[in-house]
């Protein structure tokens, strides 16, 4: 249950989200017809402070219901989980977070993984959430698991989707990735390349994930871009997230130490075809059986589910199946 409004120190005033397209910008012209692809989400926009940054989250539903927080992955945003949020509103008060540098949250010159864990921590503190369910995807899953290891008594349950970290890399590949990071940072210093219009954004969404339906791709293009002063659009993430390349490789032993501290029951979800994302090779598997077994063994109370036909973006590729698994795990099966 969420506390009364008097407890919301550091939370900015609510602003109802109407999701009207910003058609005054040339790149947004004609956006009204996109709304025919389905009802736009109903939520409120809210902000809180994480350090010096103003961090955004979407507030869905009834505040008297148990809280459920959703944390997106790298270069993603809270809108990606609109379908999942809609499917949980009858039982939960859903709060979808935009980590710093993502969505409608403020940016910083440099990014470190620990800062994202801090954003989640500060959201829970600012709203004084009691025993929230916390859901995380990809890097967001790593954030959620690390947070739950730091504060094992806070979450009531965890859902970690494609969030057990990358496969073991070859160290020379990691070194090359870090070195190339300087080139990517140089590119980021000049900002993102502009997107001509919504149709171009839609085509790019489909190129990145051919499994997307037309409705999904168009909604993500509409809600995942923002207008620029030069008349073009850009994706809703900070180009300087490229500085994450300087954090060094994923430290599996360090992550496992946090996972062993988790006490909340955890649902671990993988896409059956996600290996092609993680390993950039068609038909590849995400984690080898022995590696997967070792990672799962760190959790005291874990249920592992693999969803056939889903890639890395499980919530797009098989949204109904994911929702059914989540609701079943949370004791709220669909009727």
Image: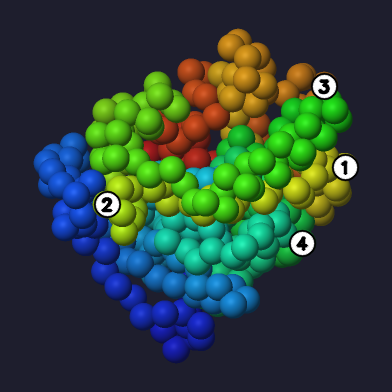
Q: Residues within 10 Å of mark 1 (few under 14, many from 20)?
A: few
Q: What residue is rendered at 70% in x and 57% in y?
A: 112
Residue 148, x across and y down, in percent: 71, 57
Residue with the mark numbered 3: 290
Residue 191 horizontal side relative to residue 15, left or right: right
Residue 264, x across and y down, in percent: 69, 53
The outermost residue toward the top is 283
Q: Earlier in the sequence, mark 4 or mark 2?
A: 4
The outermost residue toward the bottom is 6
- Mark drawn on residue 53: none
Foreground disc of the pair 2, 3: 2
Q: Earlier in the sequence, mark 4 or mark 1?
A: 4
Residue with the mark numbered 4: 150
Residue 225 horizontal side relative to residue 270, left or right: left
Q: What residue is rendered at 77% in x and 38% in y?
A: 179
Q: Please report contact status of discs 4 and 1: CB closer than 8 Å, yes or no.
A: no
Residue 262 visible in image: no
Q: Residues within 10 Å of mark 3 (few under 14, many from 20)?
A: few
**Front position in the image: 151 or 119:** 119
Give the CA separation, mark 1 to mark 3: 15 Å
- Mark drawn on residue 253: 1
Q: Earlier in the sequence, mark 2 or mark 3?
A: 2
Foreground disc of the pair 2, 1: 2
Residue 257, x across and y down, in percent: 86, 49
Residue 94 horizontal side relative to residue 165, left or right: left
Q: Earlier in the sequence, mark 4 or mark 3?
A: 4
Residue with the mark numbered 2: 231
Foreground disc of the pair 4, 1: 1
Give SS at disc 2.
loop
């Amino acid at each position: 249950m969420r506390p009364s409004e008097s407890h919301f120190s550091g939370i900015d005033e609510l602003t109802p989200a109407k999701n009207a397209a910003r058609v005054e910008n040339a790149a947004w012209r004609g956006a009204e017809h996109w709304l025919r692809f389905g009802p736009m989400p109903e939520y409120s926009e809210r902000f809180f402070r994480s350090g010096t940054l103003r961090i955004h989250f979407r507030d869905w539903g009834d505040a008297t219901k148990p809280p459920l927080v959703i944390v997106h992955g790298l270069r993603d945003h809270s809108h990606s989980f609109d379908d999942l949020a809609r499917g949980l509103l009858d039982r939960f008060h859903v709060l979808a977070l935009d980590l710093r540098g993502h969505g409608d949250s403020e940016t910083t010159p440099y990014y470190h993984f620990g800062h994202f864990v801090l954003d989640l921590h500060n959201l829970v503190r600012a709203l004084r959430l009691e025993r929230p369910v916390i859901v995380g995807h990809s890097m967001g899953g790593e954030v959620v698991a690390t947070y739950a290891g730091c504060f094992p008594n806070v979450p009531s349950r965890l859902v970690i989707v494609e969030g057990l970290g990358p496969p073991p890399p070859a160290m020379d590949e990691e070194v090359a990735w870090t070195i190339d990071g300087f080139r990517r940072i140089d590119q980021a210093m000049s900002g993102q390349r502009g997107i001509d219009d919504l149709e171009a954004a839609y085509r790019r969404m489909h190129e990145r994930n051919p499994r997307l339906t037309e409705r999904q791709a168009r909604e993500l293009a509409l809600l995942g871009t923002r207008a620029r002063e030069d008349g073009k659009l850009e994706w809703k993430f900070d180009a300087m997230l490229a500085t994450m390349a300087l954090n060094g490789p994923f430290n599996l032993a360090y992550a496992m130490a946090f996972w062993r501290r988790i006490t909340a029951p955890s649902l671990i979800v993988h896409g059956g075809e996600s290996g092609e994302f993680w390993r950039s090779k068609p038909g590849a598997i995400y984690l080898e059986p022995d590696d997967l077994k070792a990672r799962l063994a760190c959790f005291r109370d874990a249920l592992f589910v693999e969803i056939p036909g889903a890639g890395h973006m499980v919530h797009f590729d098989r949204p109904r199946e994911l929702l059914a698994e989540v609701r079943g795990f949370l004791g709220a099966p669909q009727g």
